Amino acid sequence: MVRTPLDALSLVARQRAFFETRVTLPLEWRREQLQALERAARKHEADILAALKSDLSKSPEEAYLTEVGSIYGEIKNALKHVKAWMQPRRGSAPLVIQPARAYQYADPLGVTLIIAPWNYPYQLSIAPLIGALAAGCTAVLKPSEHAPETSRVLARMLGEAFPPEVVAVVEGAADESRRLLEERWDLIFFTGGTSVGRVVAEAAARHLTPTVLELGGKSPCIVDRSADLEVTARRIAWGKFVNAGQTCIAPDYVLIPPELKGRFTDLVQKAVRSFYGPNARESSDYGRIVNARHFERVSALAADGQVAFGGERDAASRYFAPTVITDAPLSSPLMQEEIFGPLLPLVDCPSIDDAIRFVRSRPKPLALYSFARDAAVNDRVLAETSSGGAVTNDVCVHFAAEGLPFGGVGDSGTGGYHGQSSFDAFSHKKSVVKRPFALDMKLRYPPYVGKLGLLKRFL
């Protein structure tokens, strides 16, 4: 564990000196680090669950489903496949440079910085760390100060498992993040809001440091008239209200034909009651807003429309009920800002044409969800919109697909990770051509007079 006052320069120098020993290159070293991470995670599992309960009021079951369990899966996948990921990938060499063999090598980028958010403070800290270790990098992890108990567990857990020249945890707030961003890194991996993402990108640009930016945005749900409305409502309600709506890929609003709005609202309310009982405040499965500042922010957003159901809240416990809102002005903060809370606005949208136009008129979202029995409708939505990821007839589940890269586009982020994509994110793809000394074709050497015809044939 690194304690304040933070000497970021010395920390980076220490990790860089270790990386330059090339100890991190062999497969066996990488596997040993991943195994050490798994042992630490299992040893501290109860502490992690307790910390998530303290920070976000997550039940052990929800915490395991959405954070802890997926980490074990990611480590297992990396251990199984890292040898194959490390192998050079064959490319093709044109005739003019034959005989030759072309490859793509995966070189570890080096000393990396991971800045994690508070909403899934364990999963979104460890998942990128798995990619860093598999790729042969060192890492400095900055957990969010808004999830203080989880931050403390991460510092203790990783401090026991790794020497600081391999993995170091820096606790603290904005000042510590600022000091870290002043240093030169070989990659910065940031998960958080778009506004802070711009600050990170600006800091990285000063050193020409590559970044992976996992941001957010307003992820829409498009509901077609052909959709199974009850299943649609239940799935949207789960994705929206898990973790009290504090999920970067949570449904942010629903575009729905106006004649379906009333029934859809009733079905969402029915689903909420089936999940959390008649009073979500009394359910051990319903979380809380992370802190007072965010509670006030969500409360202000709720004033932008008409509450169809929900709206109950308690500032002292940071409880905010699952809430559906209608008739919010499209220019209101509720419909302009990422909600990151348990508010679900419904927007009248008579046709799929209108829905597609609406989505295309706004910044590209991190996720997009389309619901229709008619597969042609879903295919059209996928073809005519742009988003970081997308799901048809469900929400959020693409995050769990280890074989798919997860990431944003435009304002919702750059780069992706999970599975091999995590390894790739922390690797430089080095192009290599291997040639023998034999058969040195004279065609490429001057003088070129009279060679145009041959060049056209070979190239």
Image (cartoon, grey):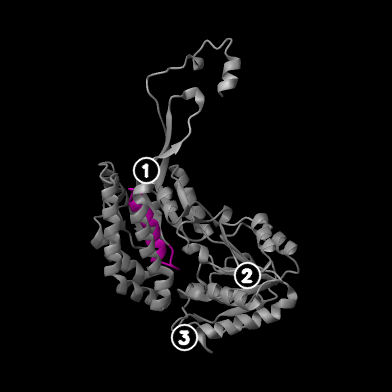
Residue 271 in the image: above or below residue 396: below
In the displayed structure, 92 sits above or below 77; it is: above
Q: Residue at x 43, y 17 (%)?
A: 440
Numbered tag placed on residue 87 in the rendering: 1
> Is the Cβ of the residue at disc 3 closer than 8 Å to that at disc 2?
no
Marks 3/2: CA distance?
Answer: 24 Å
Q: How many numbered marks, from 0 up?
A: 3
Instruction: Report x, y in % for residue 205.
Output: 47, 45
Residue 183: x %, y % from top left: 37, 47
Q: Who is closer to the viewer here, 265 or 235?
A: 235
Mark earlier in primary sequence (2, 1): 1
The image's mark for residue 101 is: none
In the rendering, at what x and y percent does residue 151 appear? 35, 67
**Residue at 62% of width from left, 55% of height from top?**
386
> Disc 2 to disc 1, how far (Cα)?
44 Å
Of marks 3 and 1, the one in the foreground:
1
